[in-house]
Amino acid sequence: MKPFPDGVASIADLASATSTGVAPRVLTVLPMKERFAFTGAGAISLLVRRMALPGETVVGAMPTGPVFDDVPFRPVPKVFSLLGARAAYAKGVCQLINQLGPDLVEVHNRPDLVLALHKVFPNLPMVLVLHNDPCGMRRARTAAERTKLARCVAVVAVSEWIRERFVSQGTQACVTVLHNSLDFSQMPPPTPLTERAPVLLYAGRIVADKGVDSYVAACGLLLPRYPQWRAVMMGADRFGYDSPQTPFLNNLLPKARAAGVDVQGYQPHAAVLQAMSKAAILVVPSRWAEPFGTVALEGMGSGAALVTTRNGGLPYVAGPAAVYVDPDDPVELAAQLERLMCDAPLRESYAQAGLERARQFDSRDLRARRGLLQADVVRAWPGRNLFQD
């Protein structure tokens, strides 16, 4: 397979080597369970909002609360399909494509959906943006499936780790990395490093994969000896006030309260960013391979010193600007936290390094790059042999 013309290594190279015309009209398709709303928005919805360009319309399931009002949104019509909910969702998206006539369709995190749309609209340029490990996704589990997928649509990954997973096992594909981003204009101003509250903050889903039980255990070791410090835990099993009370939560919450952790439950994204802008230390002790590590990036961009792990995309995001720990060793986690708690200059040096690192993910730059990629995919589709033999 030759996915690009001679001398061009990626979509990004193609974009930088050519000029673009009028920005394409883009239809951005969310996963069926994502909510494009002020309450209940997941990481994908937040990123889509942050990266939206003029002429773009976001489509997805209709949320129960108010939708984001700064980006055009259309709910996917509810239609019936004998093949189930996923097929019905695809049929509804097809209806919107016919109504809106976009120049390009960008599908987030659903290989099966983008292939279904490509089958109906084979001449319509399409981009698949991957936020998670594709090797566990429908229609992308095997190298053969991923090779076929990359011959049909343009594939973009939000991290180097996801790209590596896509091209693993001999997959023949060209995948461009376009990182997740931060919109610094929408973030609370960080509290000066010397004035940060003595708070150990955990913010994220309260599930075992996130290592939050190790955070609770470490806090239980530290807080009795450092009464001037507080520990805060923000989050629930899912995004939203209606998140279920799971067995993991039922087991963890009494331990957290016994350890002295302030358990605050699910909080809207704006409240999480406010907490990050004031806390001295953010703890992201993920056990699983984080595909990117948005919480870690937000913490660095908010001025908190970051303690995290080397799983998945986290080291790609944080680089040398974080303290790394084993998520299954609460004693080590406590020791590294204590080191930062007791050494203000060290803590502030990590926080400053994190701020500088986070600037590399500024949405202004990445949004412009996204526009270039989209314009060139439209212009080149399909005659320049971008994605197929």
Image (tube, rainbow, N blue to C red):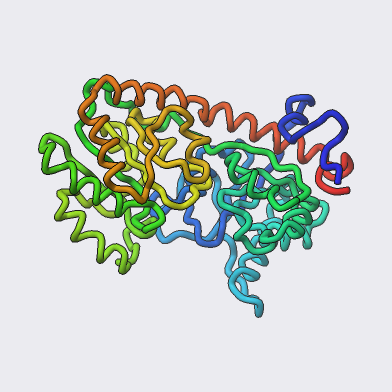
In the image, residue 380 above or below residue 340: below
Evaluate whether residue 274 shows in this view: no
Residue farthest to the bottom, as pictured: 82
The x, y position of residue 112, in whole percent, is 67, 62
Q: What residue is drawn where x is 24% and y is 46%?
A: 218
Q: What residue is drawn where x is 42% and y is 28%?
A: 321
In the image, residue 164 above or below residue 340: below
Q: How many marks can you see?
A: 0
Q: Relative to 89, is 47 on the left or the right? A: left
Q: What residue is drawn where x is 46% and y is 33%?
A: 318
Which residue is at the front of the view, 205 or 118? Answer: 205
The x, y position of residue 8, in whole percent, is 81, 31
Residue 30 figure quarter: bottom right
Q: Relative to 38, is 369 on the left or the right? A: right
Which residue is at the front of the view, 371 or 140? Answer: 140
In the image, residue 269 above or below residue 88: above
Q: What residue is drawn where x is 37% and y is 35%?
A: 299
